[in-house]
Image: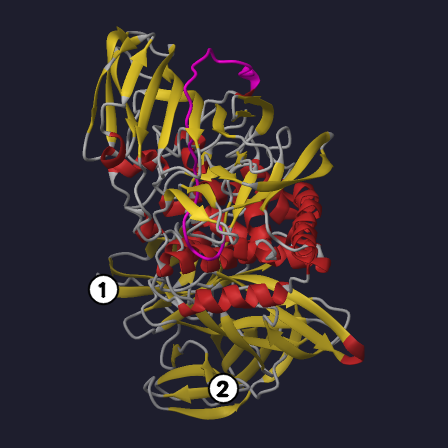
């Protein structure tokens, strides 16, 4: 449905005839399970696992033939007969159930027949029609049918619940319209209102008054195959042979002007383009509306080229006027539009893209409404990109969605309140599903890049391996993106679809001599009340340089708040390998001078880009080696420009340090930048050393502290180094004599990764380090770091 945040669709009409199932081409029949037969995740009650009420649990709906007799100029009433062909999915079926409004249709006109035999039926306060069959259907997969005749007055609108209504055109003529999203299909026709068991095929037969010039025309789903005039009545017969959710069944009956705008070639099929508009407009008004709607035909082709062929190309595409309670509703093959939105190219686009996202692939429960509305809202952005002649500004649309999403800090995209239509379409739910959903799609496109984004969407929409003409949940979309990108996006979906709030970043950057840019995450804050501890997010930077050089870089933040060892991955054309150290180098042909954080608002994150002279330098190694002439200090930094002096400091107690001097640059190789300093006059007792340098912001960065005992040589040595078998083998030339020693392992950054105390009873010690990954480490031995040994794990 469109962004006015109302409801959606369905329709019914009246009829008296019942005939055999005609022209029901079996190749259009599908077994419409929820994709992958997965249950939705989250907190839905068991009744909502079926997509709505839980009726029809022992049958699969195959086909409906709906006969409705209606006259908009009469009282608001519906009389009809709906024949349902179903296939049993359980043994020994003798009771079947449908959804139908009790307050409107629990009367003597409600008659159910099974092979000509009248059935016992009850219609309870829960709006469940229970039918007792005269005989039991014993076998699974048995195809059978029942017919339900009924008459009554559908309920009046109630907030977002619209259903079946009579309205007035701008020229004060009556018309019938239906809007059944979310739960109002049962308000006017007997159905199995289950989004996970879509209707495989349907015939819609509408009998309405016909009186020449002052005549009614019918707008509904599918292809018009017959129109017969007899005795002041006209009977319209439409057929749809694509799977359809019950809430998408629709009806509009009005004094229409009909516009047949030819056909458009989609994949070799000539798709009819049809518009139905109320009478009474000026020629200029009609021309303006037709121009806007004709733009949608061009967009239909553009969307087909990107998301896969228009799903209902063997039937039709178009729009009809006549909708209350919403600006637009994506009725399958024929979207309903309110009079005030007929010329809104954003709304028309919104309903058009729903034919892929929301109609071809529906959602398994209303909790995952964002799968339809997020894509449809983002479709408005795409309209301006793909067809500038529409006059839609993509940046304006994306900015509006982003601002709305950022203002809603409490509601997750995947809504949790959906017991009725007023809950589904509440303002907070609508903002989450439309605007935050739009930004989730924008961020997925930003991460994947256009080619892989569209490939992921086509995989999701594919009827063979994806959700196809079935229903889906959030995991269905995520799994298809994971498959195409080769990356697990679960953290991203958890944060932005299931989580609340949004992040604000400080990004550090530094130009690389000769061209290129280093980037690092300097910090992330989150909105108050956010349920996310750290957002895994795409980062977009615009990078400019001298001579008009201008480009955009994208990376994926996986640091999880670890701004020293966290991971980043290049993105924007797929997601690259995640690299530790919270630093990435993007080679460029120019030297950056200006960096701007996401000026095109591709993400929901806010932030700033700060140039620094020292970009989060990482310490790869720091160690002290005692020699006959003094203690030699070696510091190795990552390969980054360092404009600050590196100072070696010493202490006698590990707490109060003083400067010894500036460490000298030794070499620059694949292992990083190496600096050294020799303490020619160590203290007679214990010597504690550390290196320190300052960042561009003046923050002091310290290495780990290494202690050297000035009175005794090391008692331990490693027998074999590097370590290849997961164990350190140590040897001491002196018998330890049952002493207790503490063994502490530090990684290259000085972080403790393993600690244990051992009672040493001989000269050979073996320590299990099997859980350590490959790299360089320091083993400190003794309660006061008396001995320090460097080792490498391979």
The residue that label 2 is drawn on is 648
Disc count in the image? 2
Find the magenta span and give its range.
1-27
Q: From the viewer's perspective, is the residue at label 2 or at label 1 nearer?
A: 2
Report which quarter residue 91 is drawn in: top left
**Residue drawn at 61 percent across, 76 percent down:** 596
Residue 147 coordinates in the image, percent (x, y): 35, 17
Up the image or down, 54 lies above or below 496; here it is: above
Q: Nearer the viewer, residue 674 or 107?
A: 107
**Residue drawn at 29 percent across, 38 percent down:** 48
Report which quarter residue 601 is drawn in: bottom right
Residue 163 coordinates in the image, percent (x, y): 37, 42
The residue that label 1 is drawn on is 739
Q: Is residue 748 left or right of residue 610?
A: left
Residue at the extreme right of the image, as rendered: 547
Q: Nearer the viewer, residue 13 or 574?
A: 13
Task: Provide the major secondary structure of the magenta segment.
Answer: loop
Residue 383 coordinates in the image, percent (x, y): 64, 55
């Amino acid at each position: 449905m469109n962004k006015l945040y109302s409801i959606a669709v369905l329709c019914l009409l009246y009829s008296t005839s019942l005939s055999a199932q005609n022209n029901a081409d079996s190749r259009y029949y599908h077994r419409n399970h929820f994709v992958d037969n997965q249950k939705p995740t989250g907190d839905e009650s068991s009744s909502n696992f079926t997509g709505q009420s839980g009726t029809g649990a022992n049958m699969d709906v195959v086909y409906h033939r709906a006969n409705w007799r209606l006259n908009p100029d009469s009282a608001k009433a519906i009389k009809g007969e709906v024949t349902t062909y179903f296939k049993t999915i359980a043994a020994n079926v003798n009771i079947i159930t449908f959804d139908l409004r009790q307050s409107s249709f629990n009367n003597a006109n409600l008659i159910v027949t099974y092979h000509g035999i009248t059935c016992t039926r009850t219609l309870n306060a829960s709006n469940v029609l229970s039918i007792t069959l005269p005989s039991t259907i014993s076998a699974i997969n048995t195809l059978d049918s029942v017919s339900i005749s009924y008459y009554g007055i559908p309920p009046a609108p109630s907030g977002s619940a619209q259903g079946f209504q009579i309205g007035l055109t701008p020229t004060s003529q009556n018309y019938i319209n239906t809007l059944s999203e979310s739960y109002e299909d049962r308000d006017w026709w007997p159905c199995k209102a289950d989004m996970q068991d879509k209707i495989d095929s349907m015939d819609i037969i509408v009998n309405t008054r016909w009186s020449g010039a002052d005549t009614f025309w019918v707008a509904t789903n599918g292809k018009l195959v017959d129109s017969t005039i007899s005795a002041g009545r006209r009977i319209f017969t439409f057929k749809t042979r694509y799977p359809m959710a019950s809430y998408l069944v629709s009806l509009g009956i009005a004094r229409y002007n009909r516009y047949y705008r030819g056909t458009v070639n989609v994949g070799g099929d000539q798709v009819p383009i049809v518009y139905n508009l109320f009478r009474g407009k000026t020629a200029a008004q009609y021309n303006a509306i037709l121009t806007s709607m004709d733009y949608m035909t061009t967009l239909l082709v553009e969307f087909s080229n990107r998301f896969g062929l228009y799903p209902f190309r063997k039937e039709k595409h178009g729009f009809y006027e006549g909708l209350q309670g919403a600006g637009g509703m994506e009725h399958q093959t024929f979207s309903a539009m309110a009079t005030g939105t007929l010329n809104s190219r954003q709304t028309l686009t919104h309903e058009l893209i729903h034919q892929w996202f929301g109609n071809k692939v529906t959602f398994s429960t209303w909790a995952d409404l964002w799968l339809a509305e997020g894509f449809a809202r983002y479709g408005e952005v795409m309209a301006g990109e793909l067809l500038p002649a529409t006059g839609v500004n993509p940046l304006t649309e994306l900015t509006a969605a982003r601002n709305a999403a950022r203002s809603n800090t409490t509601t997750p995209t995947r809504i949790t309140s959906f017991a009725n239509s007023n809950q589904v379409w509440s303002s907070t739910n609508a903002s989450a599903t439309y605007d935050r959903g739009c930004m989730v799609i924008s961020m997925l496109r930003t991460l994947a890049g256009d080619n892989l984004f569209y490939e992921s969407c086509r995989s999701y929409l594919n009827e063979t391996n994806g959700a196809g003409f079935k229903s889906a949940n959030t995991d269905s979309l995520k799994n298809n993106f994971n498959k195409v990108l080769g990356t697990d996006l679960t953290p991203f979906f958890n944060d932005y679809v299931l989580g609340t709030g949004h992040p604000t970043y400080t990004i550090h950057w530094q130009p690389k001599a000769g061209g290129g840019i280093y980037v690092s995450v300097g910090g992330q804050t989150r909105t108050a009340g956010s349920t996310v501890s750290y957002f895994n997010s795409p980062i977009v930077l615009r990078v400019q340089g001298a001579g008009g050089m201008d480009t955009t870089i994208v990376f994926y933040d996986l640091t999880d708040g670890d701004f020293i060892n966290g991971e980043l991955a290049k993105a924007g054309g797929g997601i690259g390998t995640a690299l530790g150290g919270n630093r990435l180098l993007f080679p460029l042909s120019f030297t950056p001078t200006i960096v701007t954080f996401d000026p095109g608002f591709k993400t929901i994150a806010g932030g700033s880009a700060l140039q620094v002279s020292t970009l989060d330098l990482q310490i790869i190694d720091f160690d002290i080696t005692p020699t006959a002439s003094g203690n030699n200090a070696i510091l190795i930094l990552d390969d980054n420009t360092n404009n600050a002096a590196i100072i070696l400091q010493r202490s006698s107690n590990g707490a109060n340090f003083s400067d010894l001097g500036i460490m000298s640059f030794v070499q620059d190789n694949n292992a990083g930048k190496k600096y050294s300093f020799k303490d020619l006059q160590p203290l007679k007792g214990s010597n504690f050393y550390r290196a320190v340098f300052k960042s561009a912001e003046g923050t002091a960065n310290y290495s780990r502290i290494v202690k050297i005992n000035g009175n005794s040589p090391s008692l331990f040595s490693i027998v074999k180094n590097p370590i290849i078998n997961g164990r350190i083998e140590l040897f001491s030339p002196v018998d330890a004599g049952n002493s207790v020693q503490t063994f502490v392992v530090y990684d290259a950054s000085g972080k403790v990764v393993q600690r244990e105390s051992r009672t040493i009873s001989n000269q050979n010690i073996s320590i299990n380090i099997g859980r350590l990954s490959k790299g360089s480490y320091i083993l400190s031995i003794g309660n006061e770091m008396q001995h320090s040994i460097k080792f490498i794990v391979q």
